[in-house]
């Protein structure tokens, strides 16, 4: 069976120092990758011009990854690389292999991805979509391994990879994605901190996998057509969990352990506690309203622990009226 075409989609916000090496590794993946789309999410730091300069051969990529990973992005690709650069809503070029879309504003991770998803849909080739963070390096066989896993079961809608830490490549960041507590909306990376060489049960991982991590997520065209865009009521965090909640039982999540992707910890998002905890409350409010009391209790407990552990500012934020009002009353409509 011929694998479907794939479009890679990266949302970039002030991560161009990482992105250029990512593109060096990604554009060399193979013929199954039809196009690479970068949505420049209004960084305001000249990122779009730097990406164009790199494609023209006027700027070199650099990486803070260990030398052992140089083979993923070195030697550099032959330049110039043809770049289709456009403003959000501009003309679509289905034949373009590298596309740079300049968003009009930074609406967050979900909004940036939706700009790219809309462009891909307009290309009309029914491609699957591979979401990637700009601070990743991909192994040459990563995409093929995820495609092979998805081909084994038509019910699979999203598939994740073996994500390793970029700075500590022998250590696992996650096996594909995360577990998610039904009653508290707490989430955590499966396998985090394990050695990559440790034995694990891939079938057990998939049974515990509640959503695939957006840093590396392959979504099938059938999933995209049925589930629709990401929920833009989140700025950062819980977009993937909400996407899977929209999918319900119609689609399975999967894990391809042979797909190796290296991800820099926190380069894209940093530690935004307010967004993270607000995301938990909104997830309960939008998708599991019957769990709001237990989710709220869990956040109050986190505030209490922060105060006990000498983190008064964090505790103050979690107990502030402004935080709760924003998380529980923010207006907005679900994805169309």
Image (cartoon, helix red, strand yellow):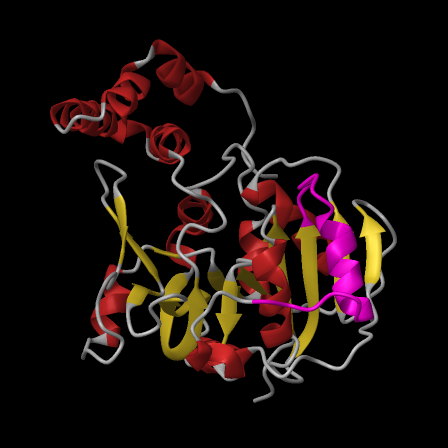
Does residue 330 show up? Answer: yes
Above/below status of 182 relative to 319: below
> Does the segment drawn in magenta span residue 54?
yes
In the image, 101: left or right of 147? right
**Where is residue 260 drawn, in percent x and y?**
42, 76
Q: Is residue 305 left or right of residue 264?
A: left
Q: Is residue 64 found left or right of 302 in the rendered image? A: right
Residue drawn where x is 43% and y is 69% of the image: 262
Q: Position of residue 331 (x, y in %)?
A: 53, 20
The percent coordinates of residue 220 (x first, y second) are 54, 66
Front residue of 96/293: it is: 96
| Residue depicted at 79% across the width and 62% down the height | 53
Q: Please tell me whether residue 58 is drawn above or below residue 115 in the rendered image.
A: below
The total number of labels drawn is 0
Magenta range is 40-62
Q: The C terminus appears in which quarter of the rendering?
A: top right
Residue 283 on the magenta span: no
Question: Dividing the image into 4 quarters, which one contains the N terminus?
Answer: bottom right
Q: Nearer the viewer, residue 202 or 223?
A: 202
């Amino acid at each position: 069976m011929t694998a479907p075409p794939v479009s890679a989609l990266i949302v970039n916000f002030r991560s161009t120092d990482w992105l250029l090496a990512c593109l060096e590794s990604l554009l060399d993946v193979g013929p199954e990758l039809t196009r690479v789309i970068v949505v420049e999410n209004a960084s305001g730091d000249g990122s779009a011009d730097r990406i164009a300069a790199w494609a023209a051969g006027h700027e070199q990529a650099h990486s803070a990854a260990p030398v052992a990973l140089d083979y993923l992005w070195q030697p550099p690709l032959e330049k110039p690389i043809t770049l289709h650069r456009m403003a959000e809503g501009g003309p679509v070029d289905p034949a373009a292999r590298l596309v740079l879309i300049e968003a009009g504003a930074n609406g967050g991770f979900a909004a940036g991805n939706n700009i790219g998803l809309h462009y891909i849909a307009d290309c009309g080739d029914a491609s699957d979509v591979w979401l990637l963070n700009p601070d990743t390096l991909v192994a040459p066989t990563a995409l093929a391994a995820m495609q092979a896993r998805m081909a084994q079961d038509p019910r699979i809608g999203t598939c994740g990879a073996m994500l390793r830490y970029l700075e500590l490549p022998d250590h696992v960041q996650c096996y594909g994605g995360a577990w998610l507590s039904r009653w508290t909306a707490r989430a955590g990376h499966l396998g985090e901190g394990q050695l990559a060489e440790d034995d694990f049960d891939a079938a057990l991982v998939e049974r515990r996998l509640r959503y695939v991590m957006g840093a590396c997520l392959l979504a099938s065209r059938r999933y995209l057509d049925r589930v629709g865009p990401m929920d833009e009521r989140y700025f950062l965090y819980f977009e993937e969990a909400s996407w899977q909640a929209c999918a319900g039982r119609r689609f399975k999540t999967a894990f391809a352990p042979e797909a190796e992707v290296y991800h820099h910890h926190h380069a894209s998002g940093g530690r935004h506690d307010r967004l993270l905890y607000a995301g938990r409350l909104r997830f309960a409010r939008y998708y599991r309203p019957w769990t709001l009391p237990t989710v709220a209790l869990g956040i109050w407990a986190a505030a209490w622990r922060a105060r006990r552990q000498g983190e008064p500012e964090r505790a103050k934020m979690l107990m502030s009226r402004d935080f709760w009002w924003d998380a529980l009353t923010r207006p907005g409509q679900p994805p169309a």
